Image (cartoon, rainbow, N blue to C red):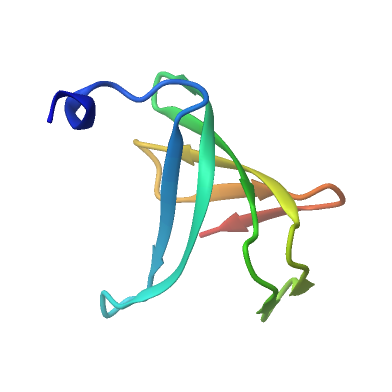
Amino acid sequence: MEENNRAREAGDPIDVRVFKYDGREHRRWAARIVKQVGPLIVLDAVFNEEIEHVLLGKIALGTIIKEYYWRDRWYNVFRFSDRFYCNV
């Protein structure tokens, strides 16, 4: 029980979950916390399946990304090796 209540730190695993507007889960993947600075949370993740994205095209299995989330903003940013993508 205490383990679940502790603050998350760099290196800790975390599940990223994406939901549709109606509340249905759309995708899920594992990531690791890189750092937390103020409202910013930075994660490292690896896609666990191949994704066909409407705007980005094919995202291969094993693609490594750095993800940026803010607790006080309504968008997030994904940094791929060759591009950035912003969810707005």
In the rendered image, residue 65, in percent from the top left (x then y), is placed at: 69, 47
Quadrant where the N terminus lies?
Answer: top left
Residue 49 versus residue 5 in the image, above or below: below
Nearest the eye: 53 or 72: 53
Residue 86 versus residue 52 in the image, above or below: above
In the rendered image, residue 12, in percent from the top left (x then y), is placed at: 45, 29
Q: Is residue 18 left or right of residue 57?
A: left
Identity of the residue drawn at 47% across and 31% down? 41
In the rendered image, residue 76, in percent from the top left (x then y), is placed at: 52, 48
Question: Which residue of the protein is positioned furthest toward the left in this rendering?
Answer: 1
Identity of the residue drawn at 30% across and 78% down? 24
Identity of the residue drawn at 42% across and 21% down? 9
Q: Is residue 68 left or right of residue 8?
A: right
Identity of the residue drawn at 61% across and 46% down? 45
Question: Which residue of the protein is positioned furthest toward the right in this rendering?
Answer: 82
Total number of numbered discs in the rendering? 0
Residue 15 versus residue 87 in the image, above or below: above
Query: Which corner quadrant of the image does residue 20 belong to?
Result: bottom left
In the rendered image, residue 57, in percent from the top left (x then y), is placed at: 77, 77
Q: Is residue 87 left or right of residue 64?
A: left
Nearest the eye: 6 or 85: 6
